[in-house]
Amino acid sequence: MTYQDASTRLAAYGQGHVLQFWDSLSTEQRELLLAQIETIELDLMQRLAQDWIHNEPEAEHFSKIEPVPTIPQAEASRADAREAWTAGEEALRAGRVGLLLVAGGQGTRLGFDGPKGAYPVGPLSKRSLFAFHAEKINNLQRRYGCTLPWYIMVSDANEQATRDFFREHNYFGLRDRDVTFFTQRMVPCMDDNGKFMLEERHSLAMNPNGHGGTIPAIIEKGIARDARERGVDTLSYFQVDNWALKVADPFFIGYHVLRGGEMSSKIHRKTEPRESVGVHCICDGQYRTIEYSELDIYPQLLETNAEGKPIYYAGNPAVHILAVPFVERVYANFREFPWHRAHKKIPFINESGDLVKPDKPNGYKFETFVFDALRFAHHDPIALEIGRVGEYTPIKQFSGDNSVEEAWRAMRDYWAGWLEAVGHTVKRDADGNAAIKIEISPQFALTQEEFVEKARGIKLPEDGDICIQPDGALL
Ligand code: UTP
């Protein structure tokens, strides 16, 4: 793109100010700026400004909202669950399953200096979120004699750091050719008047286009093609910050493939109506996930039953399965995909060329959410209930709700149960919580059954913390 092209295009959309510092830029800075401008979908941005900034968006109105039908938590004592388990294992052995991790977020709330997946979550080993997920994959590949290609979505902001982290850790024992990084698109932030903002004189303030950005990225970055070439038709989607997540859970995969699913979800029971998770429900016959920030728009979603429990209980832990042909179909109509906006404090360069750090929200970030793809599924999507314990420990910040500290507590108590199952006495505090730090590598054991089988040969220390490493050695 030449300066002239950029200038003409931007001016046509009222964004000519982006080039205001052109004369003071070096050749390299000019190239960077032009390259960035070239990636912007100006039509889309104009539409978003029109719909979300110049006009106050109207909430969708639904005449009927119903709870989503769910499959109860899979237990091997139920015939349907056994059938699902067998089908899931078959799909894994046949190499039909790929793993789709979204790790392109900015991780602002955690405030960690590096990709969120590099966060040293292991309370004793300090192993990272990426390492834990990789250890689960190593375990499953060994168990099913299969390859689980791992597709990891990153963004321009963390791609290099993520690639370097994997290289430094030898891909955590996985084959590098089975780990593919791909970038999502970035979208420009806009100020309260719908104007693009500069974060430097030669660079626009931009943000990754949300985890929904995985849909176009899967197609545009050759992931769907790679999956098809490998015979993979089922993508097991997860988010980097769910430490406890069960990667490629055979129950979940089994229900999905047996029902010919296009997009499936796990759900967990909300404990109270205002819990800060999205809610799966059926709105005028269409499958939807309503964000928790929108609960007040649909007060019905806050209703409780006679026991005081949420009627719309299907919380969204952000664990899905996407069929490759479904992603291709949604991509073909991605223009119709909904966008969401967030009003944020966005540092920017003012007309004098100085950096301004605002103390109140001054602009908008636009994002897409993967769960919005559920409305495009033709078959009724599956919603499989899970318990939180051992499945869902989202990490958004260090302390408080959905935090590192909360996740440590939950996993420590979960693993304490495993230790007790092999006859070990775990010290507990007055509230019954484990009073030592515990960490068990998922490469060593993914389930309590596997742990019980393998831990026989290990001499556990009677006192103190317990950390079992991938090879079964104690730290
Ligand atoms: P969150 O929405 O919780 O965002 O992402 P975040 O980036 O982790 O943290 P905050 O909001 O800035 O504090 C949930 C998951 O979706 C991924 C994240 O990497 C995380 O795995 N994600 C989010 C993307 O891959 N791309 C995005 O544009 C946004």
Image (spheres, grey):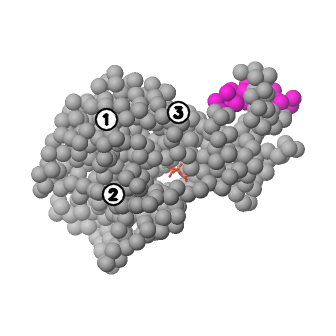
Query: Label 2, on which residue?
Result: 68
Residue found 14% across the figure and 45% down from its top: 83
Measured Cα–Cα span from mark 3 to mark 1: 20 Å
- First along the sequence among labels 1 and 2: 2
- First along the sequence among labels 3 and 1: 3
Residue 337 is left or right of residue 136, and the answer is: right
Dot 3: few (<14), some (14–19), or many (≥20) neighbours within 10 Å?
Answer: many
Residue 180: give x, y in percent of width and height: 43, 30
From where the camera sits, is residue 311 visible?
A: yes
Residue 292 is left or right of residue 380, and the answer is: right
Residue 149 is left or right of residue 25, and the answer is: left
Is 306 placed above or below 350 here?
below
Mark 3 sits near ligand 1, with its Cβ under 8 Å away:
no
Q: Which mark is residue 398?
A: none
Query: Label 3, on which residue?
Result: 183
Q: Secondary structure at mark 3?
A: strand
Q: Residues at badges 1 and 2 in contact (C-beta under 8 Å)?
A: no
Q: Nearer the viewer, mark 2 or mark 3?
A: 2
Question: Which image quadrant: the N terminus?
Answer: top right
Residue 183: give x, y in percent of width and height: 52, 33
Dot 2: few (<14), some (14–19), or many (≥20) neighbours within 10 Å?
Answer: many
User: Which span is picked out in magenta?
Assistant: 22-40
Query: 183 or 474: which is nearer to us?
Result: 183
Residue found 62% across the figure and 43% down from its top: 207
Query: 369 or 337: which is nearer to us?
Result: 337
Chief secondary structure of the magenta portion = helix
- First along the sequence among labels 2 and 3: 2
